[in-house]
Image (cartoon, rainbow, N blue to C red):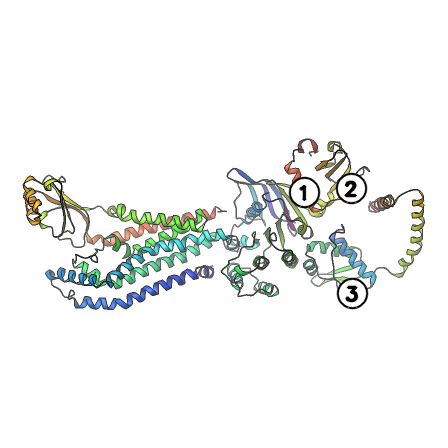
Amino acid sequence: MIEFHLDGRSGVAPYLQLIHQVRHALRLGLLREGDQLPKVKDVAAGLAINPNTVLKAYRELEYEGLAAARPGIGTFVTGTLGDGASLAAHGPLRRDLQRWLAKARGAGLDEESIEALFVSTFRSAREEDIA
Amino acid sequence: MTWLTWRQFRAQAFTAAAALAVFAVLLAATGPHLASLYATSGISGCQATSCEHLASNFLQQLYAAGTYWVLYLLGVVIILLAPALIGLFWGAPLIARELETGTSALAWNQSITRTRWLAVKLTLTGLGAMALTEGLSLMQAWWAAPIGRAVGHGAGGTNLAMGRFSSLVFATHGITPLGYAAFAFTLGVTAGALIRRTVPAMAVTLAIFAAAQIAMPLWIRPHLFPAHHTVIPVASLESISLQQGGLNGRSFALSAENLPGQPGAWLLSSGAVNAAGHPVSTTPAACTAQSVDNDTPAFLGCLDSHGIREAVSYQPTSRYWAFQWTEAAIYLALALALAGYCFRRLGRRLS
Amino acid sequence: MTAVIETGSLGKRYRRLWALSDCTLSVPAGHVVGLVGPNGAGKTTLLSLATGNLLPTTGTIEVLGGRPAAGQAQLARVGYLAQDAPVYAGLSVAEHLRLGARLNPGWDAGLARSRVERLDLDAGQKAGTLSGGQRAQLALTLAIAKRPELLILDEPVASLDPLARREFLQDLMEATAEQGLSVVLSSHLVGDLERVCDYLIVLVGSRVRLAGPLEELLAGHHLLSGPRRDPRSLPDSMQVISASHTDVQSTLLVRTSGPVLDPAWMVSEVALEDLVLGYMSQATGRGRRNHLEVQR
């Protein structure tokens, strides 16, 4: 059974942190299919956070197909992450990114401008996806 | 709620029980001896004429012995103080303490309404208060029964010879202590509810209760029933108080201490009146000689010959229990009214 | 979802001072509601009205669909923990549990006992000798073992040390999860509230300034920082809550439903503390309210 922790200063919403920790555990193999996630009550008590926050994280995981709730018993892992196929795609993508970064620096952008450009493009792309 | 009331009341209950026990022991230790003294005094089988004399002797004997007088007074004081102490230590903190310490927030947010909370507390503690005070009174009455009987036979002449209508005896015998206890207790609870601090509530309770206990015998009790009036010859008076004064004995005041033919009556007032029925305090010229010589029988005879008689207003002894019931009822009614006010006040949300 | 607390223009006046005015709320069930505001804002008054400790001067209030403290059944559905966790100093821990058992028909003796054991409380110890944290835990035990639907707590952790505070909140969250409680919790310490609450009511100067699900409120407010601007020049879709200016720069707390597209602004997300401080300065005016804010 994994244990959650919260970073109060990361600026990331608690429920997102929980989701990230579950996905991280899945990637590392700490959680496998069929394992039970910690009970909502125990997570809420352990971290002194609102149970609805935990419920929201677990529901999101359910929506992503990574977990399933069994009423009265608990929430269990149903999916996996990070199979070899997607990891293989990381290499070419990383090289593309390095080439782009070199171009951006060559155009005279400093680090903060590069980061701002990336974040705003990333966000607007995500919003287009949702729309 | 019964358990909680008892648990919060436990300390006061034990104190009261201890005091009651000590008092009981004192009375039990001396009571039988007192009874035997009475038995040997011969009053029980006395003839009508000798009764008064035997009874007075008995009481003088007791008074001279010292301890009985002290114990009697002690008993009277305890019974008079008990309602006041109950009002202060059982009544005033009942609501005030809960508000002061904030525990009212705990008590009144359990699944019990304030009305029920107060009802149980008032009833159980109030009944306890009445039982305690009346218990003290009954124990004293048992112990002092011989004294009472002696007084009933017309004994006089000592401090012990207090008639049952006298302020001290009336307030400590019969059922009036019940009424006082109920009143003092609910007075304390109400003061606590209004003032919301225990110590100031105690002070206010004491002040008001004391005022009531002074006002009742002085101004209210005598008028509970219409007084009887009678005019009697001065010569027939048996026990009097005569004051003579002024220049050459020009003024006098004559008051009777008992009423012939009405043993045990409560004398409200008495004074000399002339033939027309008007009060008189000037000594007739012809009688000044006797007054200067302090020759009482002659003086009285002289007054009599001038048509001066004694006007007495009194309450007959047969009315004793009527007075007891009425006074107790007044105090109980006050207690109920105060309790009702507390319920309304609590319902309107104190804080 | 039904409302646990529903008020309509609720107001309470003490002599000449209005402790709470024009309060209209519909607090949904199933949430941990944080009631935030500076001292003296009216938090205790609102909670006292909800528990039936006070009667309103004007307006209406309904708790769980009934009149507060209307009778035994209503009282059984609401648990209350007053400020500073009052307990009977002369009664022992076990006697407090007995009190709960005798006075509450819905009392869960097993829950109470297991809590006391887990807290390592000595059953025979007089409550007056307990530490502040232990008293708070005892009071919490009494409140939750009667199995209420709604739990109301007035500044429950204000006087506790950080460890006691954390343990109290942990136990509160556990009970909330286990019993499906709705909780209304007042505090002027915003740090704890952020983790624990998912619905927020901001009370400043005896009025409700903000009420809604916490996440929505945080997402709908932004901290804008940029070159000095008159707040009135901002688009109508942006409501300026508070503003501060230097000669060249303006920092604004705004409420808006859409994204902030003007590139001149540096946009930061707000934390609960920023939100409360912003509404507090709006309420106190600071002498600049009248001509600096866009009123909606």
Give the class, few, some or many, for how many residues have Cα within 10 Å of label 1's Cα (few <14, many ≥20). some
| Discs 2, 1: same chain | yes
The numbered disc on residue A34 is 3
Disc 1 is attached to a residue of which chain? Answer: C
Q: Amino acid at mark 2?
A: Val
Residue B245 against residue B135 in the figure, above or below: above
Residue A4 shows in this picture: yes
Disc 3 is attached to a residue of which chain? Answer: A
| Discs 1, 3: same chain | no
The alpha-carbon separation of the residues under discs 2 and 3 comes to 43 Å
Which residue is the site of mark 1? C277
What is the secondary structure assignment of the residue under circle 1?
A: helix
The alpha-carbon separation of the residues under discs 1 and 3 comes to 46 Å
| Percent of width and height locating residue A16 | 76, 53
- Which residue occupies the foreground of this view, C233 or B246? B246
Residue B42, quarter of the rendered image: bottom left
Q: Nearer the viewer, mark 1 or mark 3?
A: 1
Q: Amino acid at mark 1?
A: Leu
Which residue is the site of mark 2? C267
Give the class, few, some or many, for how many residues have Cα within 10 Å of label 3's Cα (few <14, many ≥20). few
Q: Earlier in the sequence, mark 2 or mark 1?
A: 2
Q: Is residue B207 left or right of residue C254?
A: left
| Percent of width and height locating residue C267 | 78, 41
Contact? badges 2 and 3 (CB < 8 Å): no
**Magenta range:** C32-38
Contact? badges 1 and 3 (CB < 8 Å): no
Secondary structure, magenta segment, majority class: strand
| Discs 2, 3: same chain | no
Residue B73, quarter of the rendered image: bottom left
